[in-house]
Image (cartoon, helix red, strand yellow):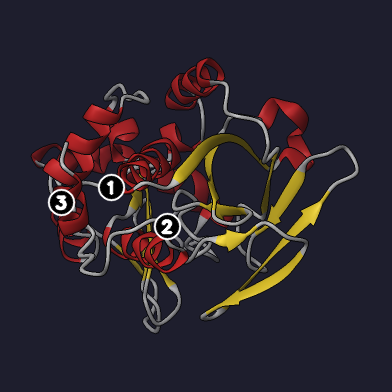
């Protein structure tokens, strides 16, 4: 595990120091070069919070990952650089599911003259870290908002019309690693990630490219349905830079799940909204 290898993976060439400018650019490059994807869950491969295996997967094999992996790797790299990083529990849609949601998301708090929230694990969320303060912020074509709740939690509101719409967190509380590990295991057994192939990545100039099952959407282009295992592997390779000979084996379950959700049609949105 070498920091230089991670920085080469995300194509970062700027100064390496614990500054807001460095954090912002590493965060952005991480998102633009490493896709959000759940392909190992689809393949039935067991995943955990081990940083060595995450590094080998994302840096060594040039794969993507989900929040536990993406933010786990980012947090490790930031600590190597010298940032003060705390892993905190997030609860995606705690607004609907209550405290049972806590731990279904991993978030990072970085101390830089006050707390800064870093999160590369949403699939379609922030491009840059945000200072933790009540109010809104705009990044390229997206507007986000932090809200302080009466029960002591904070709520992050994603850009309008996008799912997941929000998550809650306690910024001063360090993550319970056993709780994170347990929920990470549970999400591999029974969740939208087990049922649906998901691959998403923001683009520098705005918009997000997304593959949900057979449905592929690229900013500025017409949505299309993939028609074969070859087309699936080609999209994963050419659009997201992901390669694995076992991806081909996913095609029958991808087709079956699409038929269950949409029949022969196209989902209205190619995003978490359609799942």
Q: Which element is circle 3 on?
A: helix
Between 138 and 98, which is closer to the camera in this rendering?
A: 138
Q: CA distance from mark 2 to mark 1?
A: 29 Å
Q: CA distance from mark 3 to mark 2?
A: 46 Å
Q: Which element is circle 1 on?
A: loop
Q: Is residue 129 shown left or right of residue 57?
A: right
Q: Quadrant of residue 201?
A: bottom left
Residue visible at 57% across and 21% down in the picture: 176
Locate residue 192, reporting x and y percent.
50, 37
Residue 264's disc is 2
Tell us which disc is closer to us: 3 or 2. 3
Residue at mark 3: 4
Looking at the image, tell me whether mark 2 or mark 1 is earlier in sequence order.
1
- In the displayed orientation, state which residue is furthest to the right: 150
Can you say whether 57 is above or below 147 in the image? above
Tell us which disc is closer to us: 3 or 1. 3
Between 150 and 95, which is closer to the camera in this rendering?
A: 150
Q: Residues within 10 Å of mark 1 (few under 14, many from 20)?
A: many
Locate residue 195, reporting x and y percent.
44, 35
Q: Is residue 184 shown left or right of residue 42?
A: right
Q: Quadrant of residue 61?
A: top left
Residue visible at 13% across and 49% down in the picture: 243
Residue at mark 1: 64
- In the displayed orientation, state which residue is furthest to the left: 245
Q: Is residue 170 shown left or right of residue 56?
A: right
């Amino acid at each position: 595990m070498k920091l230089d290898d991670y920085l080469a993976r995300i194509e970062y060439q700027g100064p390496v120091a614990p500054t807001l400018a460095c954090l912002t650019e590493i965060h952005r490059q991480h998102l633009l070069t490493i896709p959000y994807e759940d392909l190992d869950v689809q393949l039935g491969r067991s995943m955990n919070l081990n940083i060595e295996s995450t590094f080998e997967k994302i840096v060594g094999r040039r794969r993507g990952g989900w929040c536990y992996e993406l933010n786990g790797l980012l947090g490790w790299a930031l600590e190597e650089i010298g940032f003060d990083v705390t892993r905190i529990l997030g609860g995606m849609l705690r607004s609907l599911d209550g405290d049972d949601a806590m731990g279904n998301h991993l978030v990072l708090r970085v101390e830089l003259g006050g707390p800064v929230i870093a999160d590369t694990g949403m699939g379609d969320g922030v491009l840059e870290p945000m200072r933790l303060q009540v109010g809104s912020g705009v990044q390229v074509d997206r507007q986000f908002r932090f809200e302080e709740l009466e029960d002591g939690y904070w709520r992050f509101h994603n850009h309008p019309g996008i799912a997941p719409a929000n998550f809650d967190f306690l910024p001063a509380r360090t993550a319970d690693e056993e709780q994170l590990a347990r929920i990470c295991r549970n999400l591999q057994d029974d969740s939208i990630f087990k049922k649906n192939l998901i691959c998403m990545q923001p683009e520098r100039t705005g918009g997000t490219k997304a593959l949900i099952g057979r449905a592929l959407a690229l900013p500025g282009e017409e949505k299309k349905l993939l028609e074969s295992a070859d087309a699936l592997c080609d999209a994963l390779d050419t659009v997201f830079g992901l390669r694995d000979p076992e991806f081909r084996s996913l095609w029958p379950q991808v087709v079956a799940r699409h038929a269950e959700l949409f029949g022969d049609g196209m989902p209205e949105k190619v995003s978490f909204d359609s799942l």
